[in-house]
Image (cartoon, rainbow, N blue to C red):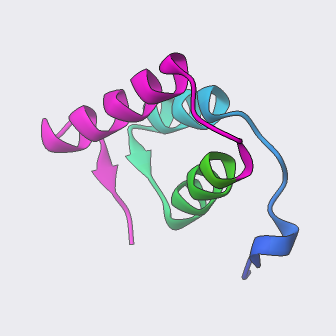
Amino acid sequence: MTVSSGNVPKITIEAIVQRIFAFRQITPLDRRLLKSAMLSEKGLNEKDHSHINRVCQGIRNGLILVVE
């Protein structure tokens, strides 16, 4: 199944990050959803930055598997 950028539902960065940590992996769909959520906002607030940093640290520390 292919998801185009026009079909990506609006979802919060917090919800996406919760899903990533629940499954301990980040899928291509998760990455597209994060990108869409970040670009749809007029600016990221401090909480959003914190969530994104958490995901980056999780990947670096091996807590989150990057699935291709």
Image quarter (top left, top right, bottom left or bottom right) of the N terminus:
bottom right
Q: Residue furthest top?
A: 47
Q: Position of residue 9 (x, y in %)?
A: 84, 54
Q: Position of residue 25 (x, y in %)?
A: 40, 46
Residues shaded magenta: 40-68
From the viewer's perspective, tell me whether residue 67 is left or right of residue 56. right
Q: Is residue 49 magenta?
A: yes
Q: How many marks?
A: 0
From the viewer's perspective, tell me whether residue 64 is left or right of residue 8. left
Image quarter (top left, top right, bottom left or bottom right) of the C terminus:
bottom left
From the viewer's perspective, tell me whether residue 26 is left or right of residue 54. right
* Residue at 30% across, 41% down: 64
Q: Is residue 13 above or below residue 4?
A: above
Asked whether 41 or 4 is in front, the reply is: 41
* Residue at 52% across, 33% down: 17
Q: Is residue 65 above or below residue 52?
A: below
**Residue 57 sits in which quadrant?**
top left
* Residue at 66% across, 29% down: 15
